Image (cartoon, grey):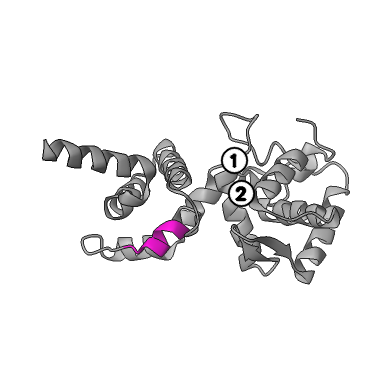
């Protein structure tokens, strides 16, 4: 996919800033900033930053959900996935600054410490979560609420089971791929408690109940 921006420039801009810039472009066109529309805009403008590592022809929607939430936490947007997102005046100012960064010309070569792995955003989000902190403090008695579980896998109460399962598997597979054993154990603990919210887990439970009745 061809972007109108130089990859050597936008590769050095944070994902959160690229996200608010994409949202600002949607707002400028008078369109609604629905989640799916934001995914399309980010991937169209900055394909190398918002694609799957193994499947660069597809946008990484789960990672984008985290960036949208970060934009909201920063006060750059308001709203939610169900009703759409609205850019704030602060968000517009940040987007203007991002545009200047994108127009500066070829960026300097990144130092090794500046390189950004595609999985770092998700792993950092999980490690900094309040749920993970409590798990580390008391693993035996750890309990997670439905609200916390949904927020952990970047979802809301309106998110359907199929999407919940996709988000959970994405997070779990990423932790496994990067050798984050403790995070994998944490997510397994969460699935033990809230697995009935996931589509495939629910199906397995129903099958077991039917077999038990026979």
Assign the N terminus to one quadrant of the image: top right
Q: Residue at point 47% right, 49% down?
A: 160
Question: Of 157 and 1, which appears nearest the observer?
Answer: 157
Residue 148 lies within the magenta run: yes
* Picture coordinates of residue 137, whole percent (x, y): 30, 65
Residue at x-position 32% and y-position 49%? 195
Spatial CA distance of label 2 from label 1 is 7 Å
Is residue 195 within the magenta segment? no
Left or right position of 186 against 124: left
Q: In this view, does 170 lie above or below 17?
A: above
Residue 59 vs residue 7, the one in the foreground: 59
**Element type where label 1 sits in the image:** loop
On the image, numbered disc 1 is attached to which residue?
A: 60
Q: Evaluate whether residue 186 shows in this view.
A: no
Estimate the x, y position of residue 155 in percent, counting from the top left.
Answer: 50, 55
Nearer to the camera, 158 or 26: 158
**Residue 64: mark:** 2
Span shown in magenta: 144-151
Q: Are marks 2 and 1 in contact (CB under 8 Å)?
A: yes
Query: Which secondary structure, mark 2?
Result: helix
- Residue 120 vs 80, above or below: the answer is above
């Amino acid at each position: 996919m061809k972007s109108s921006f130089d990859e050597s420039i936008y590769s050095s801009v944070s994902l959160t800033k690229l996200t608010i810039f994409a949202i600002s472009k949607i707002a400028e066109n008078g369109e609604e900033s629905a989640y799916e529309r934001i995914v399309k805009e980010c991937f169209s403008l900055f394909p190398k930053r918002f694609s799957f590592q193994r499947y660069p022809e597809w946008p990484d929607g789960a990672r984008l959900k985290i960036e949208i939430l970060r934009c909201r936490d920063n006060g750059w947007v308001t709203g939610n996935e169900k009703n759409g997102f609205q850019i704030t005046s602060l968000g517009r100012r940040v987007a203007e600054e991002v545009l200047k960064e994108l127009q500066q010309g070829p960026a300097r070569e990144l130092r090794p410490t500046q390189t950004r792995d595609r999985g770092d955003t998700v792993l950092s989000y999980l490690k900094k979560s309040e749920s993970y902190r409590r798990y580390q403090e008391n693993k035996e008695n750890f309990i997670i609420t439905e609200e916390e579980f949904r927020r952990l896998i970047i979802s809301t109460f309106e998110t359907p089971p199929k999407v919940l399962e996709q988000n959970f598997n994405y997070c779990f597979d990423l932790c496994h791929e990067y050798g984050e054993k403790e995070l994998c154990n944490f997510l397994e603990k969460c699935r033990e408690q809230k697995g009935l919210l996931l589509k495939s887990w629910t199906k397995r439970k129903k099958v077991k109940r039917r077999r038990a009745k026979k």
